[in-house]
Amino acid sequence: MSNLAKARAALKKNKKIDFKNRVELDPNNTTPVDAISTGSLVIDFLIGGNKLPNGQRQCPGLPRGRMTEIYGPEGSGKTTLALEAAVKCQSEGGSVCFLDYENAIAPAYAQALGVDFSDDKWDLYSPITWEEGAEIIKIMVNAKVDLIIIDSVSAMVPQATFEKDVSETGQIGLLARLQSSFLPNLVHDLRHSGTSLIYLNQLRCRIKTSKYDTGPDEDTSGGRALKYYASLRLKIKRVKTEYSKIENDLTGDSEKQPICNIVRAQCTKNKVSMHQGHSTDFVLRYGEGIDNVRSIMDIAENRNLIQRAGAWYKFVDQQGEEQSLQGKENLRDYLLENTSQFMHLVNQISSFSALGGVTKIGENEDDTSEATGETTSEKVVDPAIEALVDLALEEGLIDQAGPWYKFTDEDGEEQSVRGRDAAIDYLDENPATAVFLENEMDDT
């Protein structure tokens, strides 16, 4: 009997230890992590990481039984993303509890997104103190509510802050200390209840301790405990605002008004899949929420599944016929009306083993964001494409002769490029060839 077997036998006899807490891991398990969709196809792809052998992603959304932190600057879409997740949770028969510390939720907007306010699917509280909210969270978790949203950590005020002057000794860092003692117990309760808990958080300027302090200029509020106990951390920020000429209801004049924001989401921590540090762009449309059709359109354009020439957009439909439409909004309307064609694009995009890291909307354009002054012109290399090139070399599907890389494309024609980077760029720009090589490796 091994030492571990002896230890297990002793643990079973120990009445102080619940042996049911022992977890067995199966390396051949292909079951994805139980998750709630975010409402955004591209963010679900981003979180989910590489596909499992059964074709599913490791965690297609916000994980159940875990903590998720969504943080970013004001107006970036944190609450909208949380409400979209609530809609998805309710559509699957789940229940949602929303703790509105900021007292800023807009019922009309939430209803427009599709939130169901019925008593068996929705509960809204506006706690005054951190202690009050903590009691609500514990009760909801023990009741196995499917999704809990806290908006936000920065607005959680400890009771002692109301009773004493904030400048008094002991008040500084009080929220961080409370969170440090509360979250360890909460992690245990979440694991047994299967509740998905979302903490929304804001950014604050970090006080530099000295002139040699080279740390980040911004940090989240509420201390470091949430960073450790959250299994998933998403940083979102607005990178661009798009405008359109719309008639003013008051004056009747045609004015330039914002219609949507391009928002970038980055996995700064991911313990539910192997997709950490990757980012993706998605579209938030004013008054409507997440625009999946527009997000997929832009990714398909980056993948050359849709070709743009000026204002014209060309693509091949399910029947193999070439379609041509003028204007991005006309293309969006076409895909909204033709659901099957939209899902065809989604399936083509999701055929890649990984999506994050390459889905920058407008990465081939030198557009300047009117919202933040940043550009979206950086070139991002997909790690999955890099891995594909290396594996194809090992399998003999790509032949290397000096600096030249030779391989056969999906049409049976031989392609030759100079250098590994050129091979990666070619497969990134020709997704059909990348899928062809993946299938060839699966057959071998």
Image: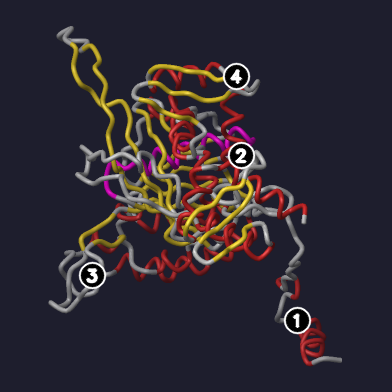
Task: Please give the residue where the numbered disc 3 appears in the rendered image.
Answer: 172
Amino acid on which the number 1 mark rests in the picture = Lys
Specify the quadrant that holds the C terminus: bottom right
Q: Which mark is residue 405?
A: none
Upstream in sequence: badge 2 or badge 4: 2
Residues rendered magenta in the picture: 73-94
Q: Secondary structure at mark 2?
A: loop
* Type of amino acid at the residue the image marks with label 4: Glu
The picture places residue 200, in percent across and down from the top left corner, at 39, 50
What is the distance, in whole Å, between disc 1 and disc 3 at their CAs?
42 Å
Pick whichever, 426 or 367, lies toward us.
Answer: 426
Contact between labelled residues 2 and 3, with CB atoms less than 8 Å apart = no
| Mark 2: amino acid | Gly
The dot on residue 94 is 2
- Other-residue count near label 1 (Cα within 10 Å), few / some / many at <14 / 14–19 / ≥20: few
The x, y position of residue 406, in whole percent, is 58, 55
Question: Where 174 sits versus 17, above or below?
Answer: above
Badge 4 element: loop
Q: Main secondary structure of the magenta part?
A: helix
Q: At x 51% / y 37%, what residue is drawn?
A: 39
Mark 2 residue crowding within 10 angstroms, few (<14) / some (14–19) / many (20+): some
Name the element at disc 3: loop
